């Protein structure tokens, strides 16, 4: 996987747009960031997961996913080692990250491709 492949998969999400945040490309749905590229360096991407989702991806693909250092990582921000990722390992994380921030009206049922801890998708308020 490289930055262009990450970008292509991120932009495949419904209504996804590329923007920039703190000098790095980011990917948003209706203004909310679900993924970024280039931090801490060009060899990484990042997906915005919950801590439980992060645990599932790190457990399933430890060579691909690693928690971001510090508080952001404890909150679920998860680095993607681009060189170790493939479309098959990255697509589920991007879908989950997108669902975490997308408005409920856009969210489709989970595809079932994600690890068990992530397949529930976004929690909704009643």
Image (cartoon, rainbow, N blue to C red):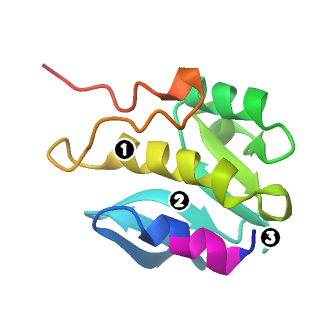
Please name the residue shown 70% across and 72% down the image.
38
**Image quadrant assignment for residue 72:** top right
Depth check: give the residue in front, 71 or 31: 31
Instruction: Answer whether residue 67 is magenta in the image.
Output: no
SS for callout 1: helix
Queried whether the magenta region covers residue 7, the answer comes back as: yes
Q: Are marks 1 and 3 in contact (CB under 8 Å)?
A: no
Q: Which mark is residue 74?
A: none
The quarter of the picture where residue 69 lies is top right
Graded by Cα atoms within 10 Å as few (under 14), some (14 to 19) or many (20 or more), the crowding at tag 1 reads many
Q: What is the span of residues highlighted in magenta in the rendered image?
A: 3-8
Indicate the quadrant containing the C terminus: top left, top right, bottom left or bottom right. Answer: top left
**Disc ID at residue 99:** 1
Secondary structure of the residue carrying tag 3 is: loop
Q: Main secondary structure of the magenta part?
A: helix
**Residue 35 numbered tag:** 2
Label 2 – label 3 distance at C-alpha? 14 Å
């Amino acid at each position: 996987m490289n930055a262009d492949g990450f970008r292509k998969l991120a932009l495949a999400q419904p209504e996804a747009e590329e923007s920039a945040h703190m000098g790095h490309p980011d990917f948003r749905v209706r203004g909310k960031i679900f993924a970024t590229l280039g931090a801490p360096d060009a060899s990484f991407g990042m997906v915005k997961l919950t801590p439980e989702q992060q645990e599932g991806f790190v457990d399933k693909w430890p060579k691909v996913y690693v928690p971001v250092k510090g508080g952001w990582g404890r909150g679920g921000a998860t680095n993607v080692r681009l060189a170790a990722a493939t479309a098959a390992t990255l697509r589920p994380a991007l879908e989950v990250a997108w669902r975490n921030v997308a408005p409920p009206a856009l969210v489709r049922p989970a595809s079932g491709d994600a690890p068990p801890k992530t397949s529930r998708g976004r929690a909704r308020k009643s």
